[in-house]
Amino acid sequence: MAKTVLEGIRTNAWAKLSFADPELELRRLRGMQIALAPFAGPAKVKNLRTNRLNWARQRREAAIFTYGVRTCVLKRPAFYAMCEEGDLDFIVTWNQHDTQHFAPVQLKEVVPRSTNPNATLEAALHKLSKYTDSSDLIVAIHLNQRGRTNFRSLIVPGINIAELWIFGASRPDQSRWFLAGDLLRQAEYHEFDHPS
């Protein structure tokens, strides 16, 4: 995660947001997912892909990304708050050396092939070329498809963002997840368990 401290009016407003512990949120949302599992209704409902449940899917993705960063990269408590402001979807915050850091993050998703058989990670990366002046924005792409990806061979277009991360489930039961990034620099691959 970016080590720079963002200052000014934006961070003053962000400091007033209600930040959540990703581990606690993931446990709560996992319970919701398990409760919906036996539901005989449409797959869109079970997979949180309706307009009414979109908030839960985005909150879960933000929590998973934050938990992965907290566990594998920062190795210190980190929290998140949903914040739809301009290009960003949520804020990650953590304290280090008596300084509160803020990282604005935008979520993207490579949807499952059952939702869109033509969705690819390469297409999602290509769409990022629209970012020409977002030098403090982190983009986190949820790779919501099964299969293997060679992250080192990915071609990332010229984009002006702070960092680029990809995360997704590394097991079909979503008990284990991966986090790859920063793909704009020396990318590292991490795996972590979903909180149970």
Image: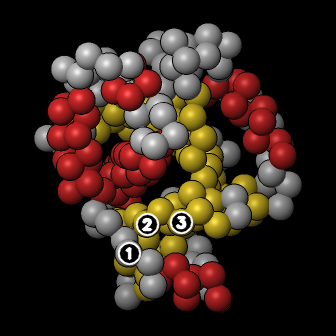
Q: Are marks 1 and 3 in contact (CB under 8 Å)?
A: no
The image quadrant that residue 154 belongs to is top right
Mark sitting earlier along the chain (1/2): 1
The numbered dot on residue 81 is 2
**Residue type at mark 2?**
Ala
Expressed as whole percent of the image width and height from the top left, the position of residue 133 reads: 83, 61
Mark sitting earlier along the chain (1/3): 1
Left or right: residue 3 versus residue 29 is: right
Expressed as whole percent of the image width and height from the top left, the position of residue 90 reads: 52, 61
Q: Are marks 1 and 2 in contact (CB under 8 Å)?
A: yes
Q: Are marks 2 and 3 in contact (CB under 8 Å)?
A: yes
Q: Could you tell me how far apart the alpha carbons at marks 1 and 2 are, in whole angstroms?
A: 6 Å
Q: In this rendering, is residue 159 above or below 161? A: above
Q: Quadrant of the C terminus?
A: top left
Determine crowd level at label 1: few under 14, some 14-19, many 20+ residues with C-alpha closer than 10 A.
Answer: few
Question: Is any atom of residue 124 visible in this view?
Answer: yes
Q: Could you tell me how far apart the alpha carbons at marks 2 and 3 are, in whole angstroms?
A: 6 Å
Residue at screen point 67% across, 13% down: 118
Left or right: residue 97 versus residue 26 is: right
Q: In this rendering, is residue 185 above or below 17? A: above
Determine crowd level at label 2: few under 14, some 14-19, many 20+ residues with C-alpha closer than 10 A.
Answer: many
The numbered dot on residue 94 is none
Q: Residue furthest left?
A: 196
Q: Disc 1 designates what residue?
A: 18
Q: In this rendering, is residue 153 above or below 158? A: above
Residue at screen point 72% across, 55% down: 161
Determine crowd level at label 3: few under 14, some 14-19, many 20+ residues with C-alpha closer than 10 A.
Answer: some
Q: Nearer the viewer, residue 121 or 75?
A: 121
Q: Secondary structure at mark 3?
A: strand
Q: Disc 3 designates what residue?
A: 83
Left or right: residue 132 versus residue 7 is: right
